[in-house]
Image (cartoon, rainbow, N blue to C red):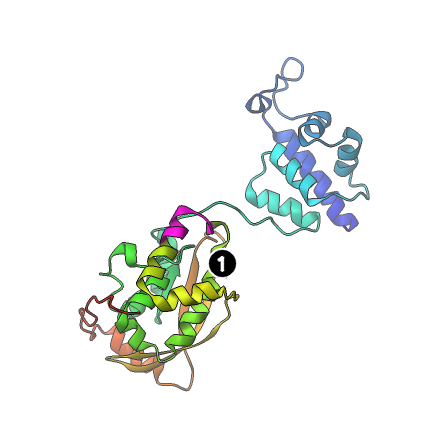
Amino acid sequence: MSDGRRQELGQFLRDRRGNLVRAELGLPPIGRNRTLGLRREEIAAFAAVSITWYTWLEQGRDINASRQVLESIARVLTLTSAETAYVLALGGYTPTPSNEVITVEQAPEHLQRLLDTFDFPAFAVAPDWGIAGWNRAYAGLYTRIATVDPEQRNLLWLIFTDPHLRKMLPDWEETSRHFVAEFRAEAGARLGSAAHTTLIKRLSEASTQFAKLWADRGVERFASRQRVFLHPVAGELVFEQHRLVPSDAPELHLVMYAPVPGTPTKERLQILLEDRVPPAAYPLDHNVG
């Protein structure tokens, strides 16, 4: 740890220690009037470290602080997740992944407004790969998105159970394999949760292809890549798929299909944006493998 980081860490801990409300931690005032701030020895006792060591940490001395100790101190100081990540970064560590299982059914309004500004297909994906929001161009690309049962409005579910979407994907075998491997890599804390187990069970029962791919235990990190769709009205559409993670809503991923230059995709998208696609282009049918 550099001198600058040590000094900043010490000052940050001192500031947060001085702002703690003693009554909220079940501690009496110090003297007659002082209700704010904990003593160093109190922080050290709660964090199970020596008072000398903690004093040196606040003084910015050249000592080694383990991740576990910094996380313990962060809990005692009741730091927010952002503050804890900052402390860990100063100590030379990356934040510990959260074990919280987050459920998102609808994208926040400000993210929906962002999606609506794009003139190419874009949508928001929740941690369970539920589709939490989409724009007009995506609704033109996949016309059933607004009418499909919300319980089935899941990217994995649609890829493996909607024969019309499958027909639009000439590279369905490769795409489905990528999706399953990426989903497993991102499952994280959801593995073992009731919702995750139910989704995997439903998919395995609905699609033998999904069951096989899931049993293969492939794992891949997301990578931007080319996506080709054979749209029944607009014809062949060639996109480059990108994904962004909003810093203020990291549980959501924004997926964007940007038209590939040199192809007629951008011009053909105008057909979808001009509402010339029949609203019932894809009838409901789950009889797929």
Give coordinates of residue 69: x percent, y percent.
Answer: 69, 39
Q: Which residue is mark 1?
A: 186
Give coordinates of residue 86: x percent, y percent.
Answer: 63, 47
By secondary structure, the bulk of the magenta-drawn segment is best described as: helix
Q: Is residue 7 above or below residue 139?
A: above
- Image position of 143 (left or right of 114): left
Q: Is residue 114 above or below residue 196?
A: below
Query: Mark 1 belongs to which amino acid?
Result: Glu
State which quadrant residue 227 falls in. bottom left
Give coordinates of residue 155: x percent, y percent.
Answer: 36, 63
- Image position of 80 (left or right of 69): left
Q: Residues within 10 Å of mark 1 (few under 14, many from 20)?
A: some
Residue at x 68%, y 29% (from the top left corner): 43
Residue at x 65%, y 37% (from the top left corner): 72
Q: Who is closer to the viewer here, 111 or 162?
A: 162
User: Exactly how many numbered labels are in the figure?
Assistant: 1
Whether residue 279 is visible: yes
Q: Quadrant of the C terminus?
A: bottom left
Q: Residue furthest right?
A: 62
Give, as a single range, the part of the protein colored magenta: 190-198
Give coordinates of residue 74: x percent, y percent.
Answer: 63, 38
User: For numbered disc 1, what is the local secondary structure?
Assistant: helix
Magenta-span inclusion, residue 259: no
Q: Residue furthest top?
A: 32
